[in-house]
Image: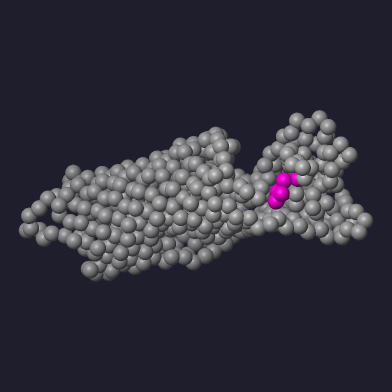
Amino acid sequence: MLGSAGKGFAQNEVDALRYSRTDFGGTARTMGLGGANVALGGDAGSFSSNPAGLGLFRRSEITVSAGFNANEVNSTVYGSEAMNSRNNLNIPGFSAVFTTRKADDEEGDWRSSTFGIGYTRQNNFNQRSFYRATGQLENLKFGEYAAQLANGDPHVNGELTYNTLQELAYKTYLISPEDDGYYISPNLVASNIFEENIQSSGSQNQWDFAYGASFRDKLFLGASIGLTNVRFKQTRTYLEEAPATDINSLTLRDELRTEGTGISLRVGAIYKPSDALRLGFSVQTPTWYNLTDRFDTNLAVNFNQAPEEGASVNQFFAADPGEYEYNLTTPFRASGGAAVFIGKNGFITADVEYVDYSNARLNADDSFNSENQTIRNVYDKALNFRVGAEARLDIFRVRAGFAQHGDPFKNSDVDQAKTFLTGGLGIRQSNFFIDAALVYSKYNSVYSPYTNLEFDNPASEFYQISAPSVKNKHENTNFVATVGWNF
């Protein structure tokens, strides 16, 4: 939960996955179709799937989207269940598309060209979670964890490493050295009740500057440059109660704020062998991020009696606020898709996307060799499937979709794939349209407030720590409405 003053406590495989695993976005039309837009084109959702889709525009267009997101997390640890939720309003998309097209009687193989600017929300980080564990929970004491961190500390000049969790524990009397130099905690003898509140906010958004062209209205080519902005804030408050020991309670609070930008390139093509079939393909380079973490951490310990003469029963110590700049490279992506049109009655569209999460890399002046090896060991290749359909009833549109984003973990007792169910409605007029979509998604995750430790330390009775494992079930309902104008 906390690291050194140089390399921050949060740069690890969790961060790499957070910014690498994105959801599908775009207009309400695209989201109502389950994000399956690689071969479809002709919609501002092409910015986040395949820029070649801009070549299918016949008129210029402006769209604005608004959304409401409801998130619920159900957490289970050692048989105890708890739930928390968070809702928020957002602007998930905006686009401006400018098309120049030759008249039908005008000669030339290149029939149209389109330039567009699009804004797409790739991740919504707004959520709350809570868990509380009670009962006989042996060997799960936070003080013991801090003591073993201190026992593994290099102890430069006899002092614990500055701005670390073990230093906070020492400054608040949660741990203390014995005569032989090994650290212990006063609350090693009882099973403690523990709980944690985690609140996250922010988003990951991308601005795309794209160009698409039509060759004989059969082959459509496109390319885009994506500029991504990241804002993430997470506050964690861990509470442990130990009334049967020298300590009544302890509260560890840390706050992480991450900001940064990234850049990527996407190219794609759509081929239309007939009016009834379209085939699409797109490739996105890794996104190269420059990120800055800012973090604050403090520990408060309440004792039954003063830990030493002249000391207060209420101890508090805060680490110096930290700041750390580093780079993240997310994985390469490749997508393919097909769309089949049923005359003027509608269509069916499907996509598959390949991404290898183990290729994410952290980099900075400090070495990230250990973290990058963990990324290679923990994460795996994944396939993301999406399928959608639209029925056309005069000016009305009815849509439905399904998507599954593969589990990014190699070996996990919990399946962490994401499943999406979508639906949507739309109205199309000659110069105006409005669409609405409802996206329901669910997935599982596993979280530990601290990591497993094992020190081969025969001088200490307590040399192995098993971290508690919290299983979370996430459910998210997202409503999006898009208004568009053609000109």
Magenta stretch secondary structure, dominant? loop
The image's colour scheme reads: one colour
Percent of width and height locating residue 141: 77, 45
Percent of width and height locating residue 69: 49, 62
User: Does residue 419 appear to the left or right of 276 in the view shown?
Assistant: right
- What residue sits 65% from the left and 50% below the top? 5
- What residue sits 23% from the left and 68% below the top? 487
Q: Quadrant of residue 253?
A: bottom right
The furthest residue to the right = 309
User: Does residue 221 appear to the left or right of 376 in the view shown?
Assistant: left
- What residue sits 44% from the left and 48% below the top? 288
Q: How many marks?
A: 0
The furthest residue to the front = 157
Along the viewing direction, whichever of 274 and 353 lies nearer the viewer: 353
Residue 1 in sight here: no
Along the viewing direction, whichever of 221 and 352 lies nearer the viewer: 221
Instruction: Note whether 351 is above or below 256 in the view shown.
Output: above
What's drawn in magenta, residue-wise?
A: 160-165
Instruction: Note whether 392 is above or below 9 in the view shown.
Output: below
Q: Is residue 5 magenta?
A: no
Percent of width and height locating residue 104: 10, 58
Percent of width and height locating residue 398: 33, 59
Instruction: Note whether 479 is above or below 74 in the view shown.
Output: below
Along the viewing direction, whichever of 74 and 305 lies nearer the viewer: 305
- What residue sits 32% from the left and 57% below the top? 209
Along the viewing direction, whichever of 126 and 433 lies nearer the viewer: 126
Q: Is residue 161 magenta?
A: yes
User: Does residue 220 appear to the left or right of 191 in the view shown?
Assistant: left
User: Does residue 40 appear to the left or right of 200 in the view shown?
Assistant: left
Residue 269 in sight here: yes
